[in-house]
Image (spheres, coloured by chain):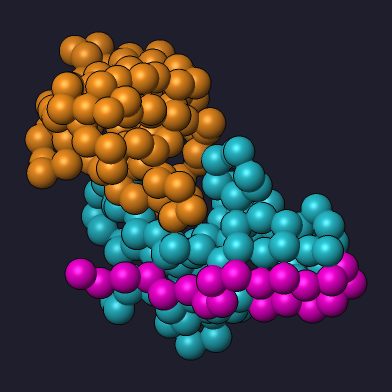
Chain colours: A orange, B cyan
């Protein structure tokens, strides 16, 4: 599986936008970019996914670079409940997701 | 909203004892996954089922771990005997099988926290 690189941690203020970066320079044409997050003491939760075009849903937006070698998860207005570990994962087939260490997002009140 | 059910939520056992975890996936989800998550690390895939068949168990320590999904619905993960290093969160997830396989989304349960003393 192609590898992703994320910062270990990021800090943001409540009610401000958050941009979480992910590099995936070895991505192949059929890899989907998935984002999951894991709140403390809970299982991972799906956030968003995309292939080539930018995507929006009720939780977040996903901006994908034109060459697809990087992407950014955007939380438009962070709340304290968004404090979690965010995982950027590439997925090609139906195999299980391969999790890295993710980005620990800290939200300051 | 449909959920993946797991039990028990917490389990404390002594080493060399047997322990079992149960998972009930979302109705209609043919694919079921078991993950292990050690504190401070990302989840690691242990086994993947497609209906009642094992698709991938390459990371399952088969000398002590076993998993089954007899009727292609709910599943059980067993550890016998438990060792101190097995202390972790055991997560179950399920997904539909669609034509665009890379786009399939996994739904995770809340997990079963195991502590081996």
Left or right relative to B23: residue B84: right
Residue at (78%, 63%) from the top-left corner?
A: B116
Residue B38: percent from left, percent from top: 65, 47
Residue at (61%, 38%) from the top-left corner?
A: B40
Where is B15 relative to A62, above or below? below
Left or right relative to A14: residue A43: right
Front residue (pair B58, B78): B78
Which stretch is magenta? B1-20
Where is A51 relative to B100, above or below? above
Residue B11: percent from left, percent from top: 66, 72
Front residue (pair A53, B39): B39
Residue at (76%, 58%) from the top-left corner?
A: B86
Residue B56 is at least partly visible in this image: no
Left or right relative to B19: residue B41: left
Left or right relative to B66: residue B46: left
Residue B18: percent from left, percent from top: 79, 78
């Amino acid at each position: 599986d192609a590898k992703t690189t994320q910062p270990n941690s990021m800090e943001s203020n409540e009610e401000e936008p958050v941009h979480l970066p992910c590099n995936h320079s070895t991505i192949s044409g059929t890899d989907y970019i998935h984002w999951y997050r894991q709140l403390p003491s809970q299982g991972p939760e799906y956030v968003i996914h995309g292939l080539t075009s930018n995507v929006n849903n009720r939780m977040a937006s996903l901006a994908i670079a034109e060459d697809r070698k990087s992407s950014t998860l955007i939380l438009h207005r962070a709340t304290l409940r968004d404090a979690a570990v965010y995982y950027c994962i590439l997925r090609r087939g139906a195999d299980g997701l391969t999790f890295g260490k993710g980005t620990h997002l800290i939200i300051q009140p | 909203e449909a959920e993946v059910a797991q039990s028990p939520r917490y389990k404390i056992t002594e080493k060399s004892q047997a322990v079992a975890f149960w998972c009930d996936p979302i109705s209609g989800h043919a694919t079921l996954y078991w993950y292990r998550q050690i504190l401070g690390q990302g989840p690691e895939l242990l086994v993947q089922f497609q209906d009642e068949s094992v698709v991938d168990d390459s990371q399952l320590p088969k000398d002590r771990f076993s998993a089954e999904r007899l009727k292609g619905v709910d599943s059980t993960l067993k550890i016998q005997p438990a060792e101190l290093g097995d202390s972790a969160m055991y997560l179950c997830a399920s997904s539909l099988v669609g034509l665009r396989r890379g786009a399939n989304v996994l739904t995770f349960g809340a997990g079963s926290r195991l502590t081996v003393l």
